[in-house]
Amino acid sequence: MSDSSWGAPPQAGQAGYWGPTGGGPVQGAAPAGPAYDAPEAQQTRPMPIVPDGPAYGGDQDDDRGAARLSGPLFRDEPFQAGGLPAETQNPEPMPDVPQPAPAPQKKSAGRDLSAAIGVGVGLGVLIVASLFIEKAVFVGVVAVAVVVGLWELTSRLQERKGIKAPLVPLAVGGAAMVVAGYVRGAEGAWVAMALTALAVLVWRMTEPPEDYLKDVTAGVFAAFYVPFLATFVALMLAADDGPWRVLTFLLLTVVSDTGAYAVGWRFGKHKLAPRISPGKTREGLLGAVLFAMVAGALCMQFLIDGGAWWQGLLLGLAVAASATLGDLGESMIKRDLGIKDMGTLLPGHGGIMDRLDSLLPTAPVVWLLLVVFVGSG
């Protein structure tokens, strides 16, 4: 900048001269002031406006004795590095403003109840009609359900785990198993089961040997889990009062599931098996036991020839236990596969296997207890 703007630098003995070292004003010097006259002040450029706050001077500012603000603006403010008050660097969080409590949500059933009830009623009418019109028709209904269940199970195994359980020998052998159980009894069911397992082993030999053991193991498991357990329904049907035995079996299983659902949905608080099925509760299991025992007493007293109400209590207790274990067993399979339902064939229910999960393991239990209580018929 030119000297005309800011004036000549002060010399020794003049106002504004700070000595050779800049340590302070020379003793006896005139008070410091502007080195230019008033007329010249009008020609100078305006001084920059320094905002209020701490002054960040260098060493020369200290040497001049200026009031350098090296601390907080107010003495009661803690000072942090960087020359800013602590409240500026680390502001304290504002107190939480109380939020209005969320509106309580109603419990959801998790499924379309209207569709589930409609499908359930339709299936019930079909089953009961075929059961009392002609036994052979009901055997055909069971065989179709078995084949569809096998298709759902093998499809999910291949989709989720890459396991190729051969469906053709399973479907043919499964249907034959049900028919053999009805015609030839338990012996015929065991023979058909053995032949189905052998057919699975041979059928899989037509493909490369990789994963052979895994595929045939899954195939034998599927043959036992779906069609073989279903043959006990055919064994019950073969008795003289077979339709009433099968009806008792179906009623107790449905009532057990209904009692578990109703009581668990309304009062359930303590989880039964949270790692397997988080929706099931101990209260629901208690509801299943109570409902099934009452229904069992009524069915044995009024539907089964030679039955007694106390036998129905034991039968209902056993059905509640087996139905719950069967439901948990399929839940384990579905969790391992990472799916919610085995299929989508039945709106509101899932697939056929989602309805057979409680029925399949309950069938041999009911068949055995009825044989013990009233004979094979």
Image (spheres, rainbow, N blue to C red):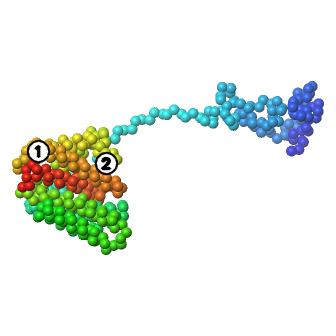
Q: What is the spatial separation of the Cα atoms under label 2 and label 1, in whole angstroms? A: 31 Å
The quadrant of the image that shows the C terminus is bottom left
Is 262 situated left or right of 180 in this image? right
> Which image quarter: residue 165?
bottom left
Position of residue 352 measured from the top left corner of the image (x, y, whole percent):
24, 58
Residue 108 visible? The answer is: no
Judging by the rendered image, the residue that carries numbered circle 2 is 277
> Which image quarter: residue 286?
top left
Residue furthest bottom in the image: 206
Q: Amino acid at mark 2?
A: Ser
Position of residue 237 measured from the top left corner of the image (x, y, whole percent):
11, 58
Judging by the rendered image, the residue that carries numbered circle 1 is 311
Q: Residue at x 72, y 36 (%)?
A: 51
Residue 321 visible? The answer is: yes
Callout 2 secondary element: strand
Q: Residue at x 10, y 50 (%)?
A: 372
The quadrant of the image that shows the N terminus is top right
Position of residue 40 measured from the top left corner of the image (x, y, whole percent):
88, 37
**Mark 2 touching mark 1, by CB under 8 A?**
no
Q: Amino acid at mark 1?
A: Gln
Position of residue 296 measured from the top left corner of the image (x, y, whole percent):
13, 46
Label 1, residues with CA under 10 Å away: few <14, some 14-19, many ≥20: many
Tag in front: 2 or 1? 1
Is 45 situated left or right of 221 in this image? right
Up the image or down, 128 lies above or below 291; here it is: below
Asked whether 103 or 181 is in front, the reply is 181
> Which image quarter: residue 15?
top right
Q: Residue at x 18, y 66 (%)?
A: 192
